[in-house]
Amino acid sequence: MPASLDPADEELAELFTAWQRDIVAVPIPSLVDPGQAAEIVARASRTRRVHAPPDDARTRPREQGKRLL
């Protein structure tokens, strides 16, 4: 590996370093509480209700008596 980078590579490395600092500087808040999300998924799986897909794609019917989880 060469001791010094090409000037264009150095500029790109500086750009990525600054970009990374910008990203790390601002914390991203949680969008959903994990406990609440798990509760919603568990509740939905108990209802065994199947919703139509938003794009109206055909889906195969669920087999009675079989559970995925």
Image (cartoon, helix red, strand yellow):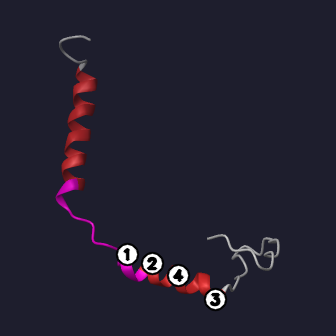
Would you name the residue on which mark 4 appears? Answer: 42
**Mark identifier at residue 12:** none
Q: Quick one: label 2 or label 3, which is nearer the N terminus?
A: 2
Magenta stretch holds residue 17: no
Q: Position of residue 14 (x, y in %)?
A: 20, 35
Q: Tell me the distance, in whole angstroms, between the alpha carbons under discs 3 and 4.
A: 9 Å
- The answer to whether the residue labelled 4 contacts the one labelled 2, judged by CB atoms less than 8 Å apart, is yes
Residue drawn 24% across the image and 32% down it: 13
- The answer to whether the residue labelled 2 contacts the one labelled 1, judged by CB atoms less than 8 Å apart, is yes
31 left or right of 26? right
* Amino acid at the residue labelled 4: Ala
Would you name the residue on which mark 1 appears? Answer: 34
Q: Nearer the viewer, residue 33 or 6?
A: 33
- The answer to whether the residue labelled 2 contacts the one labelled 3, judged by CB atoms less than 8 Å apart, is no
* Amino acid at the residue labelled 2: Ala
* Quadrant, the C terminus: bottom right
- The answer to whether the residue labelled 3 contacts the one labelled 4, judged by CB atoms less than 8 Å apart, is no
Q: Position of residue 26 (x, y in %)?
A: 20, 62
Residue drawn 69% across the image and 86% down it: 49
* Amino acid at the residue labelled 3: Thr
User: For residue 2, what is the image quadrant?
Assistant: top left
Q: Nearer the observer, disc 1 or disc 4?
A: 4
